[in-house]
Amino acid sequence: MQKNVTSLNTFANDLQGSFCCIGNCPMSGSLNFLSPAKGEKFVAIGKAIKPGNTLTVCTGEVWAHDKGGKKLIAVIQATMMAVKG
């Protein structure tokens, strides 16, 4: 399980770095692991809850799919600031 947790942490850090490259820098964020990352397939769903000119509040979920069922394994919430210029 430690390998999966490390992979999800790395993914979250890479995602934040990518946002900075496209002009959106994370102001704050929270990543909560709810269950072990076990499954045949993982699906991440993200959305902007409140997009704004300067700040945008985003949320995301990671689901593990296995044996015909799915389980929520992680949630993330972040506030992003648009960087112009």
Image: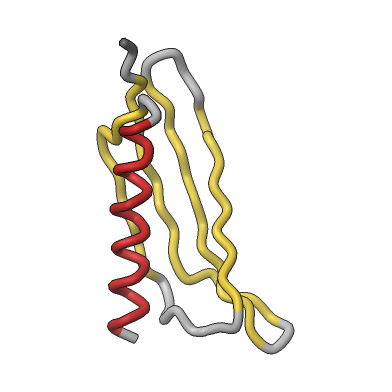
Q: Residue 69 location, x and y as percent?
A: 69, 81
Q: Quadrant of residue 20?
A: top left
User: Residue at 38% across / 22% down in the picture?
Assistant: 55
Apparent side of residue 55 relative to residue 69 in the rendered image (left or right):
left
Q: Residue 71 location, x and y as percent?
A: 58, 75
User: Residue at 60% across / 83% down in the picture?
Assistant: 40
Residue 26, above or below 52: below
Q: How many marks?
A: 0
Q: Residue 39 location, x and y as percent?
A: 55, 83
Residue 4, above or below 21: below
User: Residue at 36% across / 25% down in the picture?
Assistant: 23
Q: The N terminus appears in which quarter of the rendering?
A: bottom left
**Colour option used:** secondary structure
Residue furthest right as drawn: 68
Q: Residue 18 location, x and y as percent?
A: 36, 41
Apparent side of residue 39 relative to residue 15 in the rendered image (left or right):
right
User: Residue at 33% across / 13% down in the picture?
Assistant: 84
Residue 22, above or below 40: above
Q: The C terminus appears in which quarter of the rendering?
A: top left
Residue 48, above or below 5: above
Apparent side of residue 77 relative to residue 44 in the rendered image (left or right):
left
